[in-house]
Amino acid sequence: MKTKKETFIYEGLGFPIELVDTPMKKVFGEWVIDIDMNALQVFVFKGLIHKPYPLTGRELRFMRKFLGMSTVELGGNLGVSHATVVKWEKEQTKIGPSQEIYIRMFLFELFKDNELLTLYKEIKPKMLA
């Protein structure tokens, strides 16, 4: 049995996202979303890279985990400690605007999409400080 739900709030990525006209199917008597979860994660990742306002800690955590990175790995690549990454993700410390731009470009490069890759390679964290 299948249907569509006009709006559905999905929280499986660590933060709520609103899905519109979501295909649903009944599995063992429960309605669940019937979408390609990998495609959803890619779509959300790209949306977060381009969103016009600051990333939340939960969004940063999703992006890091989506790319299979630990807090130690991400911190090492960004020149900060893993404790700083944890504080960003728990929203105990704010990410500076120039840091956030660099974080987005760094994560985007790891995603292997060339749209912003050239710009990222030209900018170094010290230039933004």
Image (spheres, helix red, strand yellow):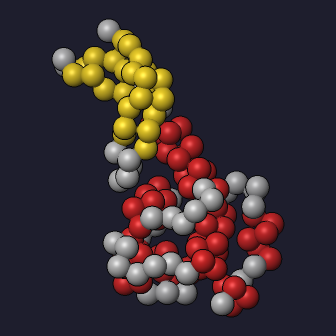
Seen from the viewer's position, the closer of residues 82 and 18 is 18
Above or below residue 108? Residue 39 is above
Residue 86, by quadrant, is bottom left
- Along the line of sight, the residue nearer the viewer: 19 or 115: 19
Rendered location of residue 33, percent (x, y): 37, 27
Image point 34% across, 45% down: which residue?
11
Residue 28, image x, y percentages: 19, 19
Relative vertical location of residue 26 with respect to residue 83 in this rendering, above or below: above
Q: Is residue 49 visible?
A: no
In the picture provided, is 128 more to the left or to the right than 34?
right
In x, y percent, where is residue 83? 37, 84
Q: In which quadrant of the rendered image does the N terminus lie?
A: top left
Which residue is at 64% across, 72% downward?
A: 101
Nearest the camera: 52 or 109? 52
Residue beneath the point at 43% across and 44% down: 17
Say whether residue 33 is left or right of residue 77: left
Image vertical order of residue 42 relative to residue 108, above or below: above
Q: Quadrant of the C terminus?
A: bottom right
